[in-house]
Amino acid sequence: DAGVTQSPTHLIKTRGQQVTLRCSPISGHKSVSWYQQVLGQGPQFIFQYYEKEERGRGNFPDRFSARQFPNYSSELNVNALLLGDSALYLCASSWGDSPNYGYTFGSGTRLTVV
Amino acid sequence: AQSVTQPDIHITVSEGASLELRCNYSYGATPYLFWYVQSPGQGLQLLLKYFSGDTLVQGIKGFEAEFKRSQSSFNLRKPSVHWSDAAEYFCAVGASGANNLFFGTGTRLTVIP
């Protein structure tokens, strides 16, 4: 059974550009969460989606948006990229609407903004 | 609000030695506590979790953790470290009804032969 898959694995963008990151959860998992992990830090919560509805949002600016599709895959969009957006973006899926059951993480997308 | 402190940024142990990674949390009610491990260039893998009940929980790869409410701690232990345990370890806390976890800043484990 495939785990959580994220694409692309790496990408380099220029300041001011827009980026879309993609995530496919484990089959049967209906919740997808996005985390940002800056080098040397722990993951920070960006969004949670469950059954295609936004269930939670972290302390991130409106430049960050996301959505979940009927097949439960998800996209994270970041507009007007800043140098500080450079980070590893992690997608985590879980079968229920609570992360307290434990996440399964993807390997992440490494975003570099130059 | 929840928060997690991992006081040790980097720990070095010899292969075969015992290991204890410290985690202190801040949360008013009974927390949901987790330990995740991250190998270089990889996502996070769940080692173990605590919700309630027995305060000593067993996880994968021979790890265990003990919840001590009086000390607000959830330290991770392993009796004998293997070279493959070298990685970054993150403690995280959740709350009932919450939709996210709060992670600590991580402890990097180096294992020397």
Image (spheres, grey):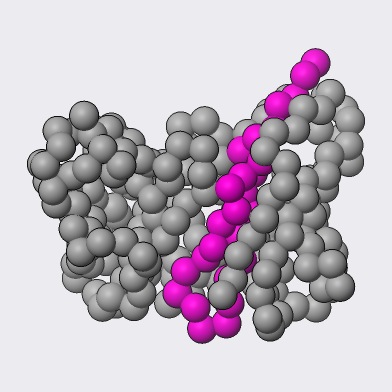
- Judging depth in this view, the residue of A3 and B16 nearest the camera is B16
Q: Position of residue A31 (x, y in %)?
A: 37, 69
Q: Residue at x 67, y 38 (%)?
A: B9
Residue B112 visible, this orientation: yes
Quadrant where the N terminus of chain B is found in the figure: bottom right
Which residue is located at x 80 percent, y 78 percent? B53
Q: Position of residue A38 (x, y in %)?
A: 42, 42
Q: Residue at x 68, y 81 (%)?
A: B28
Instruction: Name the residue: 46% across, 32% down.
Output: B41
Q: Is residue A53 above or below residue A87?
A: below
Out of A20 and B8, give the one closest to the viewer. B8
Q: Is residue B57 visible?
A: no
Q: Position of residue B14 (x, y in %)?
A: 84, 23
Magenta span has A81? no
Which quadrant of the view contains residue A101?
Answer: bottom right
The magenta span reads: B88-113
Q: Is residue A105 left or right of residue A22?
A: right
The percent position of residue B110, horizontal first and vertical second, equals 71, 26
